[in-house]
Amino acid sequence: MRAVVLAGGVGRRLRPHTLTIPKPLVPIDGIPILHIILAQLQSAGFTHVSLSLGHQAHMIEASFGGNRWADLELDFFLEEEPLGTAGPLALLPPFEDSTLVMNADLLTDIDFADLITRHKKSAAAATVALSRQHIDIAHGVVELDEDHRVTDFREKPRLSFLVSGGIYVLEPTLRRLLPTRGRDDMPALLDRARDEGERIEGHVIEGDWHDIGTPEQLNRATAAFRADRVRYLGRRAAAELGAGTGAFQEVGSG
């Protein structure tokens, strides 16, 4: 199985952590975010990962020491300018099968192999992994009709939304909808696919999902990962990462 990881972001909102290292190498409990993701993909049965790089690309390449890492075949593609969340796919050779595409700034315990399996069974052109997020409103929420009569009054409600988890499974046929050059984002690509009658499936992540865009979000992800590494990595990878052995080297472990 093949995956593409989008790792070209600058990470301005994550400063000061990104002042000296690229965002994908910011550590979670001592381990770079990107290394956690690749360890998860390897455990899920992926054999080939393409990394789309931009800001401080040389540091990310150097962190893997070559084109083999933890039994994964790696290749690197450089964005000369920011290309968004879909534009980098035009840099890669055409997909031969269903391909996982994901951002490099998240922590999740999603079963990647199960996501691929569900996608294939759905006959969809794309599957979007979704996270259920909640917003607590600190005030009473009032609704009015057109005559200004109160029709609903809810005290401090909790609102729920499904948000994109930054994880997608795409069929090779979607490549025809990519621009040959320049920026393109995944929502626009999937909108074009829907306009052409393609089925776009949603898969709700039942477990844990953390966007890592700010220092506060990084702290929450770190606390969750520190509390239960096995939940995110499985026992073998968690043990090897903890020991700093093999391809799984913790930051500062040498």
Image (cartoon, rainbow, N blue to C red):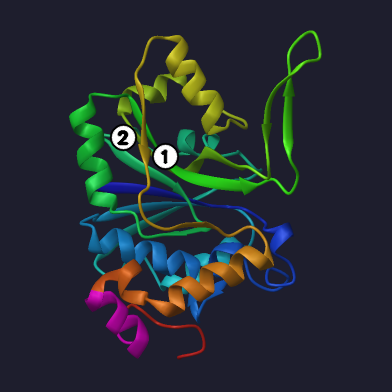
User: Dominant secondary structure of the magenta stretch?
Assistant: helix
Residue drawn at (45%, 91%), measured in percent from left and top?
Answer: 253
Q: Foreground residue, 82 or 144?
A: 144
The residue type indicated by label 1 comes to Leu
Q: Which mark is residue 92?
A: 1
Report the span colored magenta. 235-246
Residue 244 seen in the figure = no
Which residue is pictured at 46% across the width and 37% down the height? 89
| Callout 1 secondary element | loop
Disc 1 packing (10 Å; few <14; some 14–19; many ≥20): some
Q: Nearer the viewer, residue 9 or 110?
A: 110
Give the residue at the far right of this rendering.
Answer: 148
Is residue 79 rendered to the left or right of residue 230? right
Which residue is disc 2 drawn over?
A: 95
Whether the magenta-drawn stretch holds residue 110 is answered as: no
Q: Position of residue 52 (x, y in %)?
A: 49, 50
Compared with residue 10, is residue 166 higher up or lower down, i.e. above or below? above
What is the spatial separation of the Cα atoms under label 1 and label 2, in whole angstroms?
8 Å
Q: How many marks?
A: 2
Residue 134: x and y, percent?
56, 47
